[in-house]
Image (cartoon, grey):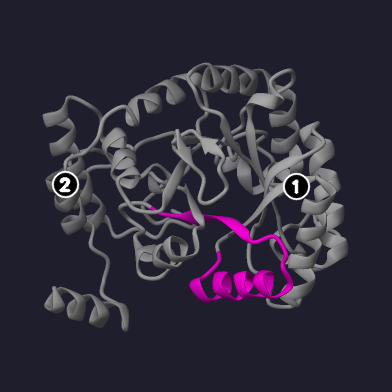
């Protein structure tokens, strides 16, 4: 268990994601977990100590929220829920424009109904809306907190300046601050180390990681000595959707993951997940599974720790290209120390 940012909430190091629940629309590629399947997965997760669950109104057009709400029937008080609201350009099911007061309050009411609950633990903005003034968006979120319908607020897919501006608006008006950032982070996507992790550490925002296995590319199924797997969400190396792929870098990272996995008598995905849990600011990792077998495979990723030398070895093989001004700042810091 870890404390979620500065909330005081204790959450499990693994958070069960529901992008695989429902299988409607663009999320069909992620998975088609039915209600019965979700009931089994959620029960196994909670019995194993997972108390943290992530969903969103856009996952399978709201069906994922419905399935999760039903799966948690009778155990809601033992669960901590994240769900997210998005502007209409990011959510076809959204009616009412950007992140206006109307959009946020209506979206929250619909999510509460689908989740079969009277409060949401963490309500996040799914993506930044450049059209609506932040004051209106954050004021609406604060209203939900004051009404008791939302316990904490957060954001997802924000840049560093967007988080800082949001926090400044909250502080100026004494409105509820963002307590979480949900962000993509893995050995293949380490860009948030440039700015987002320092911002979150400075401001006490807990990081909830999504895609920690980079869409499954760090699961061990993809390696230089293996044929492209059949039955995954990516039919070929040229069709990887939101997961740009440089195969040589991927294979180099997987080679090192496999080396460590063999020496530790564990698995490639366990090492990839454990690596992120050694990083500062990380509160929890969202894992998406299609069945209880996949869930069981991931449950043992948190009961051990990589050594500093192993983390450093993975840092070296996964180092992203240097970007200005971060690369210059890193050089100067290293020179100073």
Determine the residue positioned at 79% across, 33% down: 117
What is the number of the mark on residue 314? none
Point out the image quarter for the C terminus: bottom left
Determine the residue positioned at 24% across, 35% down: 305
Determine the residue positioned at 16% across, 58% down: 316
Q: Secondary structure at mark 2?
A: helix
Above or below 314: residue 47 = above
Task: Provide the residue span drawn in magenta.
Answer: 158-185
Point out the image quarter for the N terminus: top left
Identify residue for label 1. 150
- For residue 256, side relative to residue 198 (left or right): left
Above or below 62: residue 99 = below
Which comes before the other along the chain, label 2 or label 1? 1
**Residue 83 visible at all:** yes
Identify residue for label 2. 308
Where residue 45 appears, x then y in whole percent? Answer: 52, 22
């Amino acid at each position: 268990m870890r404390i979620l940012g500065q909330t005081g909430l204790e959450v499990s190091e693994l958070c069960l994601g529901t992008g695989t629940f429902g299988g409607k629309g663009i999320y069909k590629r992620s998975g088609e977990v039915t209600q019965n399947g979700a009931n089994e997965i959620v029960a196994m997760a909670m019995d194993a100590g997972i108390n943290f669950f992530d969903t969103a109104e856009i996952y399978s057009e709201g069906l994922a929220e419905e399935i999760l709400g039903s799966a948690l029937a009778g155990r809601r008080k033992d669960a901590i829920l994240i769900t997210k609201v998005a502007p209409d350009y990011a959510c076809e099911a959204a009616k009412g424009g950007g992140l206006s007061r109307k959009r946020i309050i209506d979206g929250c009411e619909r999510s509460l109904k689908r989740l079969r609950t009277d409060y949401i633990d963490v309500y996040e903005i799914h993506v930044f809306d450049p059209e609506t003034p932040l004051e209106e968006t954050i004021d609406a979120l604060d209203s939900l907190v004051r009404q008791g319908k939302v316990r904490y607020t957060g954001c997802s897919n924000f840049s560093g300046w967007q988080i800082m501006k949001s926090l400044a608006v909250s502080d100026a008006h004494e409105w509820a601050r963002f307590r979480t950032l949900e962000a993509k982070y893995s050995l293949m996507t380490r860009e948030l180390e440039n700015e987002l992790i320092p911002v979150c550490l400075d401001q006490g925002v807990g990081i909830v990681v999504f895609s920690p296995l980079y869409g499954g590319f760090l699961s061990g199924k993809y390696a230089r000595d293996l044929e492209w797997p059949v039955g995954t969400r990516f039919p070929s190396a040229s069709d990887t959707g939101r997961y740009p792929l440089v195969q040589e870098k991927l294979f180099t990272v997987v080679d090192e993951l496999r080396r460590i996995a063999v020496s530790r008598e564990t698995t490639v995905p366990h090492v990839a997940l454990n690596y992120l849990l050694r990083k500062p600011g990380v509160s929890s990792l969202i894992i998406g599974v299609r069945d209880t077998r996949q869930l069981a495979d991931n449950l043992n990723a948190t009961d051990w720790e990589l050594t500093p030398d192993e983390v450093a070895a993975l840092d070296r093989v996964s180092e992203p290209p240097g970007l200005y001004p971060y690369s210059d700042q890193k050089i100067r810091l290293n020179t100073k120390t």
